[in-house]
Image (cartoon, grey):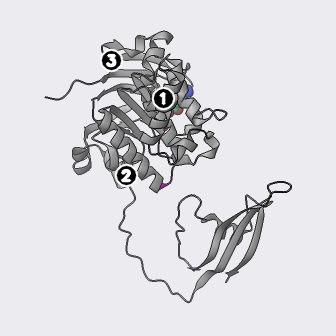
Amino acid sequence: MSKAPTIAIKNLKIALPKSGERAFAVDDVSIDLIPGEIVCVVGESGSGKSMCAHALMGLLPDTVQVAAGEIAFEGKDLLKLDEDGWRGTRGRGIAMVFQEPMTALNPLMRIGEQMMEMFEAHGLLTPKERRAKALSLAKEVGLPDPERIIRAYPHQLSGGQRQRAMIAMALALEPKVLVADEPTTALDVTTQAQILKLIRNLQRDRNMAVMFITHDFGVVADIADRVVVLRYGKVVEEGTIDAVFKNPQHDYTKALLAAVPSMHPPVRAPLDDTRRAVDVVGLDKTYVTPQGWFKPDRRVQAANEVTFSILKGEPVGLVGESGSGTAAPCESATSISPHSAARRCARSVIAFR
Ligand SMILES: Nc1ncnc2c1ncn2[C@@H]1O[C@H](COP(=O)(O)OP(=O)(O)O)[C@@H](O)[C@H]1O
Ligand SMILES: [Mg+2]
């Protein structure tokens, strides 16, 4: 017998304002969230994923109206909660992780202080205990050098670290339900893989029910137990990860699956390698940013002896994580640089044939 759902969304209908692109952002949607299970809600941009997430957190914009349905959480209908009721439920019962951590983190407060504030706001723990808890949360989400990180400000962290910090804050009050709205969409693929693994592990350790929102079936394959496919606000398909991947029923699900990039590139006709369009030879590029009087300039070597050619009629993919220097050859080739004031191109030969 399956477990009782922690959250049961039943026939939820959310009306958009008259000027909206359709009548209902979410139309007759029912989703159960079960402890220890990750449900991926997947669909293209505008399909109503974030509306579902915000309804679960009592964060719907004023411009929309719940027209029908209910969201049951431990016997309470969340749609009937007042602000007081929400204060007791948000964070403690249901917590959320957003796509862009900077929308949730306070740029002027140290990471540790923000974590401690979660307890303070609920009148929990002594200041000393709060600090110890912030440190243990930072460790639990795999932040490097947690002692230092809890004293840092958000802008001093990388994108992946900020997302870990936000996950730590979401976990602080040990919620039963975690809602994650595209938490890895803005990250590099390698960081994304680490964050997905982290959420997976935390969800298992804490037996949380997780609603994970994404537009990417590649991410679904990595993390989901169950999948709900949304289109124009309606559920078009629902099933276990196995069933949906092996035997998708709806044409829209099939189209989303077909859009996942293949790791098997098609065979291409060989190109004539004497017909070169561009040769990049030994490109070095160092960004030099003045740090003010008496301080040495900050130097970042963006490209180091980069050499490659592009043949006529050949698309070349330049691949690398954020910070790996992929922009440097493009900037040099087009004489465009976002850092023109700081730029000094030490040595490069780019020949257009
Ligand atoms: N604040 C808002 N006010 C009015 N309409 C909105 C608002 N936010 C989103 N919508 C509309 O609601 C629908 C669903 O949007 P959303 O849930 O944000 O989609 P998704 O997260 O799947 O990209 C879209 O038609 C969108 O234009
Ligand atoms: Mg969204």
Between residues 316 and 349, which one lies in front from this camera angle? 349
Amino acid at pointer 1: Arg
The local crowd at label 2, few if under 14, some if 14 to 19, many if 20 or more residues have their Cα within 10 Å, is some
Side of 7 relative to 24 (left or right): left
Side of 171 relative to 10 (left or right): right
- Residue lying furthest front in this view? 128
Q: Which quarter of the image is occupied by the N terminus?
A: top left
Give the distance between the C-alpha atoms of the residues marked 1 and 3, in whole angstroms: 26 Å
Amino acid at pointer 2: Gly
Where 283 falls versus 182 (above or below)?
below
Q: Nearer the viewer, mark 1 or mark 2?
A: 2
Helix, strand or loop status at disc 2:
helix
Residue matched to label 1: 22
Q: Residue at x 45, y 36 (%)?
A: 136
Give the distance between the C-alpha atoms of the residues marked 1 and 2, in whole angstroms: 28 Å
Q: Which residues are magenta?
A: 183-189
Q: Residue at x 42, y 16 (%)?
A: 67
Q: Residue at x 51, y 87 (%)?
A: 272
Magenta stretch contains residue 187: yes
The local crowd at label 1, few if under 14, some if 14 to 19, many if 20 or more residues have their Cα within 10 Å, is few
> Which x, y percent locates residue 315?
53, 72
The earlier-in-sequence mark between 1 and 3 is 1
Give the distance between the C-alpha atoms of the residues marked 2 and 3, in whole angstroms: 30 Å
Residue matched to label 2: 218
Q: Which mark is residue 72?
A: 3
Q: Which quarter of the image is occupied by the C terminus?
A: bottom right
> Which x, y percent locates residue 159?
55, 47
